[in-house]
Image (cartoon, helix red, strand yellow):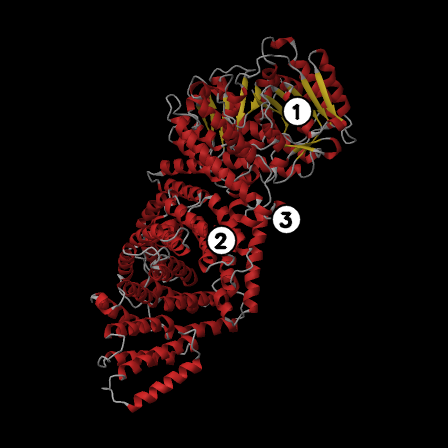
């Protein structure tokens, strides 16, 4: 009828019926019919005009018709008229937000449901569906009871039970959907959420397949529940439902539900990424956001909201992986929001984007004041505790906070606190975001304390955050709360010295350290604080704290996809990763636990090498027991190794990345992260299965002391723990307990000064007189500090001179020439150094030394040597050294790669076919980039450390790296990680390696090589493999160098031996 009549025609009907009514009494039989026509006409006119006056008059006429006597011949009865009145009230309540209309509609519809409606020819289903809608409006207007949704669920279930095949309760399900959405947006608990989900599951069975309404409604309910129970099952089901809506294409137009589904899927992915600190979740959320923002049809206000989220995710990506592209992306999105704000400062859109601090900070002070005044007016006009009132309060608090950052006036911050206190008082803490008022209030109170030094602010901050910890909704953010509580309690303990505050701090540590929602690096940092506090306080949990820190340390970097990022993360955690194992070992030594201390130092050193070595772990024993598991694990390890050793890809999407990447928003780096996380998960499952097998309980677990002491099978290993708490020297033997050499109280500082003296002097050049003096002084200082007590102890323990010994140093000792300490005082006046008494070698870890002694998988023994050389004008002595090496062909085959033949690929391939290798070229260091350390080859091509690490050389035995810096750490690298070319060559398969601690003098190459190989191939070592002779050969060759006239110490001290 509304489509058939115009407003003019309706006006004519209304006028004619009004005239007719004016001429007849109320008791006249047609009167009721005329009133009903007026009511109906007014409603139809309202539908065209959208003027509330028409709707109001329609309702008045319906009310009048109800109280009139029945009209003869009139086709509607009083119940039907009453129902039409209710429908009009229902419409007015929803359209014009009139709570009383909704309340009346609910009351009247409940009454109607109690009548025999069939008698009055009123549909019971329509009445029931209308009641669902009325209850939904009450939820929207926040005027109903606490059980409105429960009643809606019951009514919907009733409608679903009695529906007919072509009459689905769409209106009722729609009302239920929007009611739960409203409830969630109002930050109130949806009850009964499980009942809602079951109802929508039932609807899914009844409605036509692919119904967007039901799919989206069920997905929404699951998303809300996921925000409270963090169940992966709810997440997966919700995402599957949303993908069904997104993927369906009914006709050519997109439904409102289809437009909403991508936004909900993106919000859900972001929610999961914020709850669980899983890199894969971060990348998936990032890709969904990019895909969503690439849509040109996105509403501007919604675009702003997701742009803000994208900026946060990009910044989080930078913090997690150090990607410069991510930081640039974050700045770009933030700038975009600021620009939008400046162009929309006083419009509706401007109001929608001022929830970002960076945007608010862009406004002039006058606008900030204006915003505050406008919000105060709005707050005064809205009902207290309503969602609208609270939204204004939140914005007011944000604006006052922005003002405070400019004025530093405590009164502005006090206004923030007042707003937060009101918000906290009305918060529904069962809502997923119900904890936020407490979280923010606690932060603001602590800030007020910092500004004013008023203890009451600090006390209240502690109280508020304690309360927040009790909230179920705050569970994913407990770590943040614990960190702030720790800071607040420590501040109060510092000021007042209350022991109960310290006790509470110690009680909080395990909660934060074991928080599954927090990032592992953050948990590791907190565990280090735990160990420090408990050690200072002499609390009995100190060992537990140290153990937790050690277990978290390895996990702190393995989630990074590539070696470069893993190293960068370790560097970012410098001060923790490099100190924690040494701190713990010092504590264990203090407690007399020498074996445990050695285990701890082994666990905490060369973390990257250890992780990579784990990926190359032998599967021979497992293959004999369970071949399928061994094959699977080997394949995953190989994939992980290839991925980890790859070059970090781009963190942005370019045109060359392919259409699929643009469509799904996933850039090459994101794909790498996702792939790595999946491989790690598969590997963890396999390793768990293997460890359950009989005899494999220790598979890939941290090696025990009984295992690692095998490193001393060929001679003692001397471990130096350089630590601020206490420094110690431990001598490891295979068959006897470790021997402890106590050190003086100033040992730690003296070692630092020796290292600093050497570093400062080197800046003037290795050939400077100052450096020569500094090096001699350092060698003497090292002898007094380390050499003398070690030699005395070795003599006391019966270790004969000329025995093999291995140094396994930590911290600054990794850069100090322990092998050359001296001169050692003697009665005959001859200068002797440590290497004159013992044959010294180095090892980055005990495991690396053990690995270097394992039997070769290559049974045949036909030694051959690969000479890799790149002589240029700056290496005039290189040709002479090459001649020496090539002359060895009388003893073993020598292959030469020189000039244009010496490419990185050719060198790596050649190394696979030779047991020995000798490099004559430049060694290059890159500051802060240890994996870019390299050998310089033909036309400036580089064989990098990463290239070497990628190779597998099962036949390799010995390598001589006659190049600069091959055993030197780059600046900004962590000493105990041993990331240098010598360690890389040893890792890829060579059992023994000779390297250099700094620049090598070109003039020394020929003579050193000649004396070295003369010693190694002499008949004195009959029956001893050549690689085991290399340490003595190096000692002999450098001793001859030292005795040459005019020889300066930096030339002979430079050469070091690593490995077996």
- Circle 3 is placed at which residue position? 655
Residue 980, how many percent across, how many down? Answer: 60, 32
Q: Are marks 3 and 2 in contact (CB under 8 Å)?
A: no
Of pointers 3 and 1, the one earlier in the residue sequence: 3
Of pointers 3 and 2, the one earlier in the residue sequence: 2
Give the Cα distance between marks 2 and 1: 55 Å
Residue 739 lies, with reference to residue 773, above or below; the image says: above
Residue 920, how many percent across, how many down? Answer: 71, 26
- Residue count near mark 2 (Cα–Cα under 10 Å), binned few <14, some 14–19, many ≥20: few
As rendered, which of 510 and 116 lies closer to the eye? 116
Residue under the point 48% across and 66% down: 352
Regarding residue 1051, the answer to whether it shows in the image is: no
Give the Cα distance between marks 3 and 2: 27 Å
- Circle 2 is placed at which residue position? 249
- Circle 1 is placed at which residue position? 909
Residue under the point 53% across and 68% down: 363
As rendered, which of 30 and 1035 lies closer to the eye? 30
Q: Are marks 3 and 1 in contact (CB under 8 Å)?
A: no
Give the Cα distance between marks 3 and 1: 35 Å
Residue 416, how many percent across, how many down? Answer: 41, 66
- In the image, taking residue 157 as reference, residue 289 lies left or right, namely right
Q: Are marks 2 and 1 in contact (CB under 8 Å)?
A: no
Residue 765 lies, with reference to residue 961, above or below; the image says: below
């Amino acid at each position: 009828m509304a489509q058939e009549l115009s407003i003019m025609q309706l006006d004519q009907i209304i006028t004619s019926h009004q005239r007719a009514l004016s001429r007849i009494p109320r008791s006249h039989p047609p009167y009721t019919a005329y009133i009903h026509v007026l009511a109906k006409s007014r409603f139809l006119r309202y539908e065209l005009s959208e003027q509330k006056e028409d709707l109001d008059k329609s309702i008045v006429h319906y009310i009048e018709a109800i109280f009139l006597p029945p009209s003869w011949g009139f086709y509607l009865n009083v119940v039907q008229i009453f129902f039409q009145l209710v429908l009009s009230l229902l419409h007015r309540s929803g359209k014009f937000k009139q709570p009383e209309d909704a309340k009346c509609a609910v009351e009247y519809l409940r009454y109607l449901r109690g009548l025999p409606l069939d008698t009055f020819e009123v549909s019971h289903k329509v009445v029931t569906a209308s009641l669902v809608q009325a209850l939904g409006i009450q939820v929207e207007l926040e005027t109903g009871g606490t059980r409105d949704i429960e009643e809606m669920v019951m009514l919907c279930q009733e409608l679903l039970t009695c529906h007919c095949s072509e009459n689905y309760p769409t209106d009722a399900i729609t009302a239920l959907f929007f009611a739960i959405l409203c409830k969630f947006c109002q930050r109130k608990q949806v009850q009964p959420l499980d009942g809602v989900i079951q109802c929508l599951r039932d609807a899914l069975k009844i409605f036509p397949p692919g119904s967007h309404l039901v799919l989206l409604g069920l997905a929404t309910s699951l998303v809300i529940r996921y925000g409270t129970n963090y169940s992966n099952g709810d997440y997966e089901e919700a995402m599957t439902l949303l993908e069904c809506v997104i993927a369906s294409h009914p006709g050519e137009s997109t439904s409102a539900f289809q437009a909403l589904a991508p936004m909900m899927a993106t919000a859900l992915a972001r929610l999961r990424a914020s709850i669980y600190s899983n890199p894969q979740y971060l990348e998936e959320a990032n890709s969904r956001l990019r895909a969503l923002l690439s849509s040109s049809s996105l509403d501007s206000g919604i675009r702003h909201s997701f742009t803000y989220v994208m900026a946060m995710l990009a910044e989080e990506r930078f913090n997690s992986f150090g990607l410069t592209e991510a930081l640039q992306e974050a700045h770009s999105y933030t700038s975009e929001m600021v620009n939008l704000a400046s162009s929309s400062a006083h419009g509706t859109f401007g109001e929608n984007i001022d929830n970002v601090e960076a945007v608010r900070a862009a406004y002039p002070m006058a606008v900030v004041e204006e915003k505050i005044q406008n919000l105060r007016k709005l707050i005064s006009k809205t009902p207290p505790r309503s969602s609208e009132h609270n939204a204004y309060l939140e914005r007011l608090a944000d604006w006052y906070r922005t003002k405070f950052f400019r004025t530093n006036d405590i009164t502005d911050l006090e206004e923030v606190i007042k707003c937060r206190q009101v918000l906290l008082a009305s918060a529904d803490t069962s809502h997923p975001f119900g904890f936020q008022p407490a979280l923010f209030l606690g932060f603001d109170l602590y800030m007020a304390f910092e500004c004013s030094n008023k203890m009451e602010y600090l006390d209240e901050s502690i109280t508020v955050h304690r309360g927040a910890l009790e909230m179920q909704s705050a569970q994913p953010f407990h770590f943040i709360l614990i960190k702030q509580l720790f800071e607040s309690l420590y501040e109060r303990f510092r000021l007042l010295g209350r022991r109960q505050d310290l006790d509470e701090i110690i009680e909080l540590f395990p909660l934060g350290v074991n928080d599954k929602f927090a990032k592992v690096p953050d948990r590791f940092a907190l565990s280090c604080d735990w160990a420090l506090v408990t050690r200072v306080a002499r609390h009995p949990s100190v060992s537990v704290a140290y153990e937790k820190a050690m277990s978290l340390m390895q996990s702190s970097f393995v989630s990074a996809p590539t070696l470069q990022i893993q190293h960068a993360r370790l560097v970012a955690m410098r001060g923790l990763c490099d100190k924690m194992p040494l701190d713990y070992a010092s504590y264990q030594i203090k407690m007399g636990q020498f074996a445990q201390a050695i285990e701890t130092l082994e666990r905490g050193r060369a973390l990257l090498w250890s992780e990579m070595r784990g990926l190359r772990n032998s599967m021979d024993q497992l293959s004999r027991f369970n071949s399928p598991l061994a094959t699977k694990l080997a394949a995953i390890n190989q994939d992980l190794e290839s991925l980890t050793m790859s070059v970090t890809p781009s963190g942005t999407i370019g045109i060359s990345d392919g259409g699929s990447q643009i469509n799904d928003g996933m850039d090459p780096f994101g794909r790498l992260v996702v792939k790595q996380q999946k491989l790690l998960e598969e590997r963890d499952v396999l390793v768990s299965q293997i460890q359950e097998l009989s005899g494999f309980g220790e598979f890939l677990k941290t090696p025990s002391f009984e295992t690692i002491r095998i490193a001393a099978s060929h001679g003692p290993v001397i471990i130096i723990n350089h630590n601020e708490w206490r420094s110690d020297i431990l001598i490891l033997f295979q068959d006897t307990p470790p021997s402890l050499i106590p050190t003086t109280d100033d040992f730690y500082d003296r070692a630092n000064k020796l290292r600093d003296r050497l570093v400062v002097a080197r800046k003037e050049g290795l050939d400077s007189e100052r450096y020569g003096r500094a090096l001699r002084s350092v060698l003497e200082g090292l002898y007094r500090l380390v050499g003398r007590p070690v030699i005395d102890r070795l003599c006391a323990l019966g270790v004969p001179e000329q025995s093999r010994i291995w140094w396994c140093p930590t911290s600054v000792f990794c850069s100090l020439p322990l092998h050359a300490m001296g001169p050692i005082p003697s009665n005959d006046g001859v200068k002797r150094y440590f290497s004159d008494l013992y044959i010294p070698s180095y090892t980055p870890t005990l495991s690396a030394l053990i690995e270097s002694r394992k039997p070769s998988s290559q049974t045949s023994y036909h030694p051959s040597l690969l000479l890799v050389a790149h002589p240029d004008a700056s290496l005039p002595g290189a040709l002479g050294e090459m001649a020496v090496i090539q002359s060895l062909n009388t003893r073993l085959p020598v292959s030469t790669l020189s000039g244009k033949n010496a490419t990185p690929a050719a060198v790596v391939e050649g190394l696979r076919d030779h047991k020995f290798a000798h490099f004559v070229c430049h060694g290059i260091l890159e500051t802060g980039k240890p994996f870019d350390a390299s050998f310089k080859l033909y036309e400036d091509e580089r064989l990098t450390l990463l290239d070497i690490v990628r190779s597998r050389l099962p036949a390799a035995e010995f390598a001589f790296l006659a190049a600069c810096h091959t055993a030197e750490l780059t600046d900004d690298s962590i000493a105990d990680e041993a990331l240098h070319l010598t360690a890389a060559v040893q890792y890829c398969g060579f059992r023994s390696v000779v390297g250099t601690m700094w620049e090598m003098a070109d003039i020394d190459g020929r003579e050193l090589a000649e004396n070295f190989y003369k010693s190694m191939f002499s008949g004195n070592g009959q029956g001893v493999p050549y690689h085991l002779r290399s340490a003595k050969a190096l000692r002999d060759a450098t001793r001859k160098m030292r005795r040459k006239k005019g020889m300066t110490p930096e030339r002979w001290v430079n050469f070091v031996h690593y490995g077996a």
